[in-house]
Image: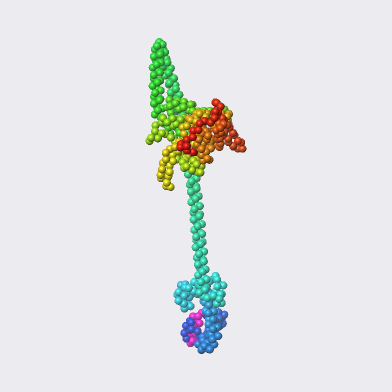
Amino acid sequence: MEPGVEVGWDELVDVLRAEGVGDVPIGVWMTAEELSRVAGVAGCEGEPVSAVTRALRGLGDLNAWLAGGGAAGDVASLRTVVEGLAGLDAALSAARLRAMLAAREAGLPDADGAVSLQAWATSAMALSTATATREVRLAEGLADRPDVVDLLQSGSISHDHAAGIVAAAERQAADQEAAARARAAAEDEERERRRRADQLAQAEAESMAERTRLAREAAERERQLAQERAERAAAEAAEEAAARRARQDALLESATSGASPDQVKRRAAQLRTGDADALERAVAAQRSRRSVRTWTDRTTGQRVLRVDLVDDDYEMLTAGLQACATFDPPKTPDAERRTPEQRRYDAFVDLVGAGLKAGELPTTRGVRPHVTVTVPVDTLTGDADLPGVGASGVTLSPETVRRLACDARLTRAVLSPTGMPLDIGRATRVWTAAQQRAAELLFGGCAFPSADGQPCGRPMAWTDLHHVTWWRHGGRTDRANGVPLCRHHHNAVHHDGWRLAFDVETGTVTIKRRRSGTTVKRTTVFPRDNPRGGPPPDSRSGDDRLPI
């Protein structure tokens, strides 16, 4: 073998065998003489082979020292040798890892016919399959970490430590890869969501456009149909009017042509009879269509009443409304003036209220018709503002309930915590008949002062007695604290900010309201037709008095 030529371990073993050295199994250290002989035979002048030769020579000397028994007498040297062997093992591990990487780069596994680097390391380095697999994996893991290999070579870290670093790096890489896959999946999902949202928005826009087009077409068709119906109705009406005029002309001509006055009178009577029959048929048709309907307006929440009347019933209702309707005094401010519709509404309610108060309507299960409102007592006392509920399910505001309770019969109902009635007391009237009569003698009707100083004057039957000082503020139910108010002005006191006062000694009723920095005050004195001769008799009744 020529000097300076690099040879592999197998070749080195073959050379030694040819020279008669014999078998040199891996892991058996040679003596210094054997190492020198090997080096001389192989001509190892190259740096890598020379380094291996020197390492083997040193290990041979160490083996000879340990085998010769010199270690037993030199404990300090033995300790140093043992500590140094750990570094040698780490350096050998680093060299083996680098050798595997170098062999892969040089293509030795392919050149030697190995199917993989692991198989080559198993054969070339005399390792088990599992050990070769671990070492190759570690070498590949440290391929980009020469600093870790340097630490392993220097003995700063162990072989297991280096393997742990590679395992941690692999786990980190796996986590990063998983995170990257998760991010990619999230991005794909977001792109898909946006794509579907765009498709949905586009489909919705197309659907809206189609609905708009169909609605326009339907509206146009409905307009055309309505126009056609109107034109047909106008034509039919014109034809009917022309035919009616022709019939009338023919009847008039036949009745008067060549006839005596008596004949004309008889013919006129016959025509009137025919007209009466037509009127009866019209009345029968109206009665078949008579109806009363109620519903709730979805926008305002108000209850709506529609009445389809027969002619004579309309006349009766109109007469009642005219009797109950009153105009606002001439000097009433515009802000307080009622519209015609509001006046008719107040007249209609007064008409219904008068019918209820008359007491002549049929009873229902032994009870005369009345308005029933269920309300917590705390609302009446002013300790709470809880709404009331009417018998038809209508919700009433607390102030409306207090207004209704000013002149009403109250029934006490004691309920359990679960809402079960425990005790239903007798109905008690707030104002006694004597108190009502005394108020009628003094006031004569609604006592609300108008803008001209005159009282409203609506009949007493249309009024409720109002507590001047509200019971929840300590007011009593007696003649000195009761003033009759019509429904319109009773609402004004409870809902429109008017404050009412009554001086029983002078008979003066005063109302006052402040809005937008301006105070409005009005007074009127009762009785108005004679000087006061002293206060009216006391009409209080302790047993029947119930504050509101």
Q: Percent position (x, y) of residue 514? A: 59, 37
Front position in the image: 12 or 169: 169
Considering every residue shown, the one lying at the far right of the view is 517
Q: Place residue 251 in its image quadrant.
A: top left
**Picture layout, residue 91 above or below residue 349:** below
Q: Residue at x 57, y 80 (%)?
A: 47
333 relative position to 126: left or right: right
Q: Is residue 107 visible?
A: no
Where is residue 326 shown, x and y percent of the image? 51, 28
Q: Is residue 177 above or below residue 309?
A: below
Q: 202 or 289: nearer the eye?
A: 289
Residue visible at 54% across and 28% down in the picture? 533
- Relative to 131, say whether 414 is above or below: above
Magenta range is 8-21
The image quadrant that residue 421 belongs to is top left
Q: Is residue 203 magenta?
A: no
Q: Position of residue 138 (x, y in %)?
A: 50, 72
